[in-house]
Image: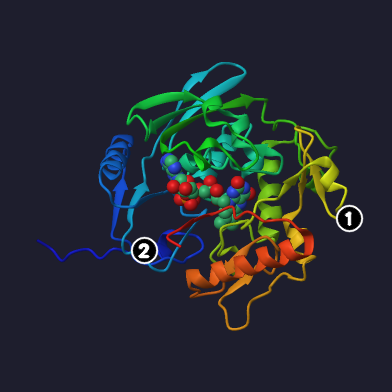
Amino acid sequence: MGPALSIPALASLTTMQVGGVPKSITKCESTNDLYEAAKAAWLSDEPFQILGGGSNTVFADEVAHLNIILVANLGKEIVFEDDQKAIVRVQSGESWDELVAWAVEHNLAGIEAMSGIPGSVGATPVQNVGGYGQEVSQVITQIEFLDASTHEVEIKPASFFKFSYRDSALKHDLKGVIGWVEFELQKLGGLSVPMASGQITNHVGAEYGSALPLKVVRDTVIELRSSKGMVVRLDDPDSVSCGSFFTNPVVSFSKSLEFPDEMQKWEMESGDVKLSAGWLIENAGIPKGYSIPGSKAAISNKHALAITNRGGAKAEEIVQLAVLIQERVAARWGINLIPEPNLIGF
Ligand SMILES: Cc1cc2nc3c(=O)[nH]c(=O)nc-3n(C[C@H](O)[C@H](O)[C@H](O)COP(=O)(O)OP(=O)(O)OC[C@H]3O[C@@H](n4cnc5c(N)ncnc54)[C@H](O)[C@@H]3O)c2cc1C
């Protein structure tokens, strides 16, 4: 028998790079392994956490009680195709951004504006991942799901997951494991779907709502994201984060009128209005780059919504900064900012 392999700290498995050494890590390289590991965990009394790419999870420094189920099932296949569309079934452990790159390369439209988002495919339904005018709920057809309440594996339609802005039933009462996700992508002769992001169309001098070459959309989004530290890069300390640490608060139309016009606001289909959390933070007196004196956690220099680890931060320091931001924004604007990442073990 060789030497026992040591269990790595969760800092090494998360983009925020914080988190202690867990009790165990079970790497699941097939959907079957994933489902079996989850069922065993539900039957035991021990706490556990499912982990994909670790880009939306902040673990506490002390997690010695926690078992980790690491999602690593790979593979994708086109399960249906005609002249107009392709339906692609993708295993949970696949990289989301590699899927987007593959779709762009194969002239399949519908996810191009979500280029550069880190993490796994299986995590994208959890918070209905989105960016630059697209959300995964627009293209998900069905999901294979192991339901914690029944221990049955079933193929569920997208509607089962009750998607809304950065939200799904999986962030509330629905507990279970996603084995694979199916996406319906369109064949538009190398063009994107109509772009619902002024940032993209302005950047290339096109009209809002135009379809652009898929590669142009991908390159533009990665360029825009990089300028905000929103692409994980080894050479960018501002990307040692979970992306946006808070969701943009959604308020009623009448409430939105209480906020100054200079703040960017987005009217939603529901009639409610999404406010800019970054603006609220900066206008509560917390500038980009801000850090509590002596702390190794800081607001990104490029984006007021991202909390970053400036090297060797403790999870505790990340959370202290998050709480300070919440308190200042609540005091100045009367808005409770809701953290976007999963905070585990605090
Ligand atoms: C630089 C940066 C930029 C980002 N930009 C965006 C953005 O523009 N838009 C956006 O929406 N998000 C963004 N994010 C957040 C993050 O990338 C997404 O939420 C991503 O989908 C998380 O994937 P993951 O595999 O890393 O999830 P993890 O952090 O590993 O897990 C997230 C949650 O999903 C659960 N989970 C993971 N896999 C499964 C599964 N197979 N079955 C059931 N539950 C599962 C976990 O238990 C956890 O609760 C950004 C993050 C970073 C670091």
Give me the residue at 41% from left, 59% from top.
13
Which residue, given by chain and number where applicable, does mark 2 sit on?
Answer: 63
Q: Marks 1/2: CA distance?
A: 43 Å
Of callouts 1 and 2, the N-terminal one: 2
x then y, percent, for residue 120: 47, 45
Q: Is residue 141 visible?
A: no
Residue type marked 1 = Pro
Which residue was labeled with disc 1? Answer: 260
Please say whether residue 45 is visible from this viewpoint.
Answer: yes
Front-lying residue, 12 or 284? 284
Q: Looking at mark 2, is its residue's CB closer than 8 Å to ligand 1? A: no
Q: Is residue 130 left or right of residue 25?
A: right
Decide if residue 292 is on the left or right side of residue 170: right
Numbered disc 1: secondary structure: loop
Crowd class of label 1 (few under 14; some 14 to 19; many from 20; radius 10 Å): few
The residue at the far bottom in this view is 294
Residue at 27% over, 49% down: 45
Picture coordinates of residue 184, whole percent (x, y)? 57, 25
Q: Between residue 306 and residue 333, name the one nearer to us.
A: 333
**Rendering coords of residue 20 (x, y %):** 38, 67
